[in-house]
Image (cartoon, helix red, strand yellow):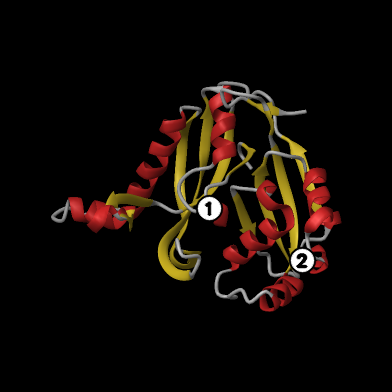
Amino acid sequence: MARYDTGGEGMTFSMIHLEVSKRPLVFWARQSKFSLADRDYLIHAAMRFSFGSKAPQPFEVFDNGGKTLKVLGYADCPGAELVEEMGLAAEPMLHEVIPPNAVRSKDMPSSWPEGKSFGFRVRFCPISRRSGEGDKIVERDAFLAACERTPDDHVDREMVYAEWLAERFKAFDGAQILDMRMKSFRLKEFCRKDKGRSLRKLTRPETIFDGVLIVTNSSTFSLMLREGVGRHKAFGFGAILLRTEGC
């Protein structure tokens, strides 16, 4: 069984692959009075109602235009345990939203070869945080924050986001980025619950970077994959997905 070291007890570390059926998802959302405006929030909610605290996080959602959505993410248990959890408490409709036979997983390595290179992809939310009025935490697009710091200079969005990502990699100290490029960017409207549990709308930057990394520390690299990078990791951001270099 694959494990990663967090400084305490070892824990199962799995990559999870789910298929989410679109039509049942919409039906369940309407029955449950969830807004259809934020797909990632719906996926988050469906997984939490299905798997509880074992739900994959971080994760990313892929839509190829078919009848299902693909979800790839990381969890502290294998897929069989997610299916077992779903069988205990999830309502029947959720078994159509996330069919148990469409839950797959693999054990992630217990150790990583240091010096090994991988291609990677990560969808992340590059924001800076600061204290506002009344010590309220204010989130800003990292690009806009950089523009405010240097109002007389030209600021390149891709460079700002690349530096933001490199800083997160450096904080884990598990891998070094050899090459990266921004594949897409947009401002995305989110649905999130505030402290009063009411839904509110937020607009945040969403970007996808593609690149090549080299593993520098096996244990902290595992931790970085498991934790993900940045904010909103429960809603489809921050999952570092690996591939064989050159693919």
Vertical position of residue 241 compared to residue 192: above or below:
above
Q: List the residue tagged with mark 1.
A: 237
Task: Specify the label residue 60 is tagged with.
Answer: none
Percent x, y of residue 226: 59, 38
Element assignment for label 1? loop
Vertical position of residue 174 compared to residue 56: above or below:
above
Mark 2: give few (<14), some (14-19) or many (20+) Cα within 10 Å.
many
Q: Residue at x 70, y 60 (%)?
A: 49
Q: Nearer the viewer, residue 200 or 182?
A: 200
Three-letter code, disc 2: Val
* Residue 155 in sight: no
Q: List the residue tagged with mark 2.
A: 97
Three-letter code, disc 1: Phe
The mark nearer the N terminus, 1 or 2, is 2
* Residue 200 in sight: yes
The C terminus: image quadrant = top right
Percent x, y of residue 222: 59, 30
Q: Residue at x 61, y 50 (%)?
A: 59
The N terminus: image quadrant = top right
In this rendering, which labeled residue sits more in front, label 1 or label 2? 2
Element assignment for label 2? helix
Percent x, y of residue 220: 53, 27
Mark 1: give few (<14), some (14-19) or many (20+) Cα within 10 Å.
many
Q: Residue at x 72, y 73 (%)?
A: 28
CB of mark 1 within 8 Å of CB of mark 2? no
Q: CA distance from mark 1 to mark 2?
A: 21 Å
Q: Is residue 73 left or right of residue 192?
A: right
Percent x, y of residue 186: 44, 64
Q: Is residue 50 left or right of residue 128?
A: right
